Amino acid sequence: MRRLFITIIAIAALTAASAQGIIRPKTSGAAVKKKPATTVRHKKPQRTPSPKERFDMDAHRKRLVNKLLGDMVYVKGGTFTAGCDTVRFNKERAREITLDGYYICKYELSMALWDAFMKDNWWDGDYEYYTKNPMGKDYAKCNISCKEIQTFLERLNAYCGQEFRLPTEAEWEYAAIEGKPQARYRFSGSNNANEVAVYKDNLEGEEKKSYHMGCKKPNGLGLYDMSGGIAEMCYDPYNTYSPDRPVTPNGKKDYKCPPGEHTHVTKGGHYQSLEHELYPWARGLWISDGYGAWYVTIRLVATEIRK
């Protein structure tokens, strides 16, 4: 009896131990292999490319050059009456000039196109800006000297295989009056200066408007800011009209920037000009002393465009 009691107690103890996991039953078959502990490898953090490394300068230049080529407007050659001697202010002797056909850009020279070929010292902010804004903003480039203009044209032409240059005064005026035999309007594209020009009377104190291109109505050829905005330098040196030194007609292939001249004709007036200074035939004067001017930019012209 005592032996049976001891046996019952032992069986109860074994059952309790098995339930608590103290005694584990033997597994049948092959032994279960433990998985080897995995080694955690820490990846090296990847270096973020700099804005300069992310920026494709060649693609940027191609975009801007393609836009420039698309913005070139053909002006059919013909004979027109330059000047006007019937107005009260800014009279210029009327005379006939005959021109061959040529191309002229819809817009003044943009900061983006200038920077792409002339800004040699870029910083991260520049790359970042043009990465997010591939075409830049529509602001005209001013404060550029004749020497810088010459360098710009050489670089641009070498890159794109074209022959862009400055317009002659006659070419500029002919385009401003829409390639017509005579000027139909007092301003380029309208008799109302507010429609086509940013100038002193409508600036409203916001000087930044002066640099924004294309915010007014274009003329009949689709050219913007031929009146007001920023004055535009022509190839011709400033001089009085005379038989021995007439206005230069069509430009030649080497007409890039006036060589050895210190005074140049500007056309179109600018954002601080009075209304009568915006006439297509009105002439401004820029004295080139090796520096640019806050009120002067350029508009590109080409005798032909190679496809």
Image (cartoon, rainbow, N blue to C red):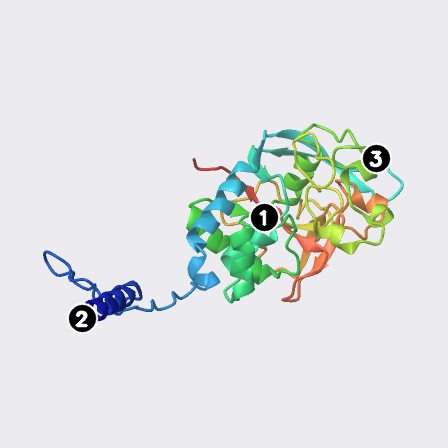
View extreme (front): residue = 1
The residue to which callout 2 is attached is: 3
Q: What residue do we see at 53% from left, 41% from top? A: 67
Direction from residue 292 to residue 63 in the image, left or right: left
Query: Where's residue 225, x and y in %?
Result: 71, 42
Labels 3, 2: front one: 2
Residue type indicated by callout 2: Arg
Q: Earlier in the sequence, mark 3 or mark 2?
A: 2
Q: Looking at the rendering, which quadrant does residue 87 occupy?
A: top right
Question: Mark 3 — residue?
Answer: 192
Quote the CA–CA distance across marks 3 and 2. 126 Å
In the rendered structure, are the residues bearing label 1 and label 3 in contact, judged by CB atoms less than 8 Å apart? no
Q: Looking at the rendered structure, which numbered label has been put on residue 166?
A: 1
Callout 2: SS: helix
* Amino acid marked by disc 3: Asn
Query: Which amino acid, mark 1?
Result: Leu
